[in-house]
Image: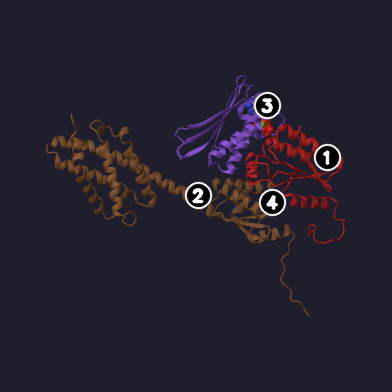
Chain colours: A brown, B red, C purple
Amino acid sequence: MKNEAVKIFQKKKSTILENWMNNQLQDDGLREDLMSNEDLRLQSEELLSSLVDSLTDANIESSGSGDFDTIRDILASISISRAKQGYSPRETGLFVIGLKDALLKTLGTEIKDPETLYKQSMMVNKVMDNFAMHTFETFIKGREEVILRQTDEIADISTPVIRVWDGILALPIIGTLDSSRTQIVMENLLQEIVDSGSSIAILDISGVPAVDSLVAQHLIKTVAATRLMGAECIISGIRPEIAQTVVHLGIDLSQIITKASLASALKTAFNIMQLEVNKKQKLKA
Amino acid sequence: MEKIPILKMGSFLLVTIQVDLYDQLAENLESDLINMVKKTGAKGVLIDVSSVSIIDSFMGRILGNIATMSRIMDASTVVVGMQPAVAITLVELGLPLKGVYTALNVEKGMDLLRSKILQEEGPQDDDDDGDEDHTE
Amino acid sequence: MTTTETKIILNKDILRITKDSDVVPYRNRVKEYAVKIGMSLVNQTKLITGASELVRNMLKYGGGGEARIEVITQGRNTGIRLVFTDQGPGIPDIKRAMTDGFSTGKSMGLGLPGTKRLMNEFDIQSEPGVGTTVTVVKWKNG
Ligand SMILES: Nc1ncnc2c1ncn2[C@@H]1O[C@H](COP(=O)(O)OP(=O)(O)OP(=O)(O)O)[C@@H](O)[C@H]1O
Ligand SMILES: [Mg+2]
C-alpha cells in the first residue's frame, strides 16, 4: 500500500515550503538581526528537500530509522549554529514545529477521508516530534560548548601575572580557586617566572571568597612548585576570617610566607632581595 | 659506557643533564659526583636540569641521594632550571626532594651557594655591609 | 560531562618491557602519541612521569611485561590509555600498596599513589601468583 502522506509531500513540496516560510516569518520573535530571510529560506529548503527525499512508505513509521541520518545532521548543524549565534530555544524549536504545522496543513487540504487523515497525521506528528526532540538536544549541546569555551576564557582572563618590580611578580586571584583554576594559575605563574627570571612571586588572595582545606591544598601546591623552580612564593591578602577558618580547619600553612596585604608582601619581597625603599632626602647645602 | 661530564667551577661542581637519563647512567652519576666532591673538596654541587623533560621518583631519589651524601661531605646541592611542567608534576607526584636547594638558573644557583657558604662561616666576618642577613 | 559514553580505541601499540634500557624508549613512544593528539605540555609531563613509574614497577617487581599504549576517545574527550600487564608475583594488599610511603623495595613508595594523582583514571588489578595489571587514562585537556 502506497503511503498517502509521502505521496502528497512529494507533490506539494513547494506549497509546504511557502506555508512553512510564512509560519516562520509571521512569528514576532523572528531574528532578522541574526539571519537574513534569504538564508532562512535556503536553510528551510535544504531541510525540506532532504525530508521529502528520504521519507518512504517504509520508514515513515519508524522515526529512528537510519534513512533520516542526513536530516538529523542538518538539524544538528542548524541548531548548534543557532545556539552559538544566540537564538533562544523557542526560536530554534519553532523552526521544526513550523514545518510540522505546514505538513499537517497540507495533509488536511489533500486528504478527504477523516480516518486516513487522522492516521497519516499521527504518523507525521510522531516523525516530526522526534526531529524536534533531536533539535533540542543538539541545541543544548551547542550551548554547553559555548559555556565551556567561556569558562576557559574567563579562567584565562582572570589570572593576570603582573611584574611589579624587577624580579618580583604579583598575581591577584579573583574568584573561587578550584582545581582547574589552580592548574592555570600555577602554569601561568611558573612560566612567567621563567620568562622574567623573577625570584619572588606574590599570590594575592584578597579576591578569593573562601579558603577551605581544598583551596589551601591548592595554594600549598602552588608554593611548592614555585620553590622547586628556585623562586619564593608569598601569599598575601589573608583576611581575618580566612585566618580563622584556616586555624579552625587545622590547615598547616606554617611552611608558607603569608601576609595580610599586598603592600606588606612587597615589603617582605624587598627584604628578601635586600632592597630598601627610602624617602628622597633633600640635600642640604 | 657513556658518562655525564662533571665540570669544576672554582669551589663548585656543575653537572648539566642533557638527555633523559638511562637508569645505569643516573646511578653512575651518583657515585661519580660523590667521588668528585671528595677529590676536589668542592663546597657545592650544581645540577642543571633545564633540559630534562621528566623527573620520576627514580630520578628524584637520585637527586635526593646526591644532596644527602654531599651534605655529609659538607657540600650543598642546588638543582637549577627546573621546567614549570616538571615542577608541577613533581608536586602532584608527592616527591619532596628533601635537602635539595633550588635556583632559577646556574648563575643564581652559584649566588645561592656563595651565600650559604658565607652563612656557615659565621657572622664574625668583615663588615663589608650589604650581603649579610639582617638581624633585628 | 557524560562519563557513561563508551571509550573508543583509535590507535594502539604494544611494547615488551624486559630490561632497564626499555624504559626511556617506551617513555619516548608515549610522548610521541601524546604530542600527536595535541596534549598540553603539563599533561604530557604528568602522563609520561606516571608511565615511567608504572613501567619501572613492572620491571622491578613484576619481572617485566607488556606495556600497551592506546589513543582513545570518549564523547568530546581524546586521550591516552596505558595498560601495563605482568605475570609477576602480584600484590597481596592493594590498599596498602596504594598508600603514600609503602614500599617493599626500600624506596619512597610514591609510584602508585603518585601516579594515581597524576592521571584522570587509574585502575589496578592484581592477584598473588598470577600477576598485575594497571590501567591509566590521561585526557588531552584533563
Ligand atoms: N607490578 C607489580 N608487581 C608486584 N608488586 C608491585 C608492582 N607494582 C608495585 N608493587 C608493590 O607495590 C609497592 C608500592 O609501589 P610504589 O610504586 O608505590 O612504590 P615503590 O616502587 O616501592 O617506590 P617508588 O615508586 O617511590 O620508587 C611496591 O613496593 C611493591 O611492593
Ligand atoms: Mg614504584
Q: Give the image location of residue B61, x and y in percent.
A: 72, 36
Q: Residue furthest bottom?
A: A285
Residue labelled with disc 3 = C19
- Give the spatial CA distance, label 3 vs label 4: 38 Å
Q: Nearer the viewer, mark 1 or mark 4?
A: 1
Q: Quadrant of the N terminus of chain B?
A: top right
Dot 4 beta carbon under 8 Å from ligand 1? no
Q: Nearer the viewer, mark 2 or mark 1?
A: 1
Residue labelled with disc 2 = A152
Badge 3: few (under 14), some or many (20 or more) residues near its Cα, within 10 Å? few
Amino acid type indicated by mark 3: Lys
Badge 4: few (under 14), some or many (20 or more) residues near its Cα, within 10 Å? many
Q: Are marks 3 and 4 on the same chain?
A: no
Chain holding disc 1: B
Label number found at residue A208: none
Q: Is residue A106 left or right of residue A251?
A: left
In the rendered structure, are the residues bearing label 2 and label 1 in contact, judged by CB atoms less than 8 Å apart?
A: no
- Give the spatial CA distance, label 1 vs label 4: 28 Å
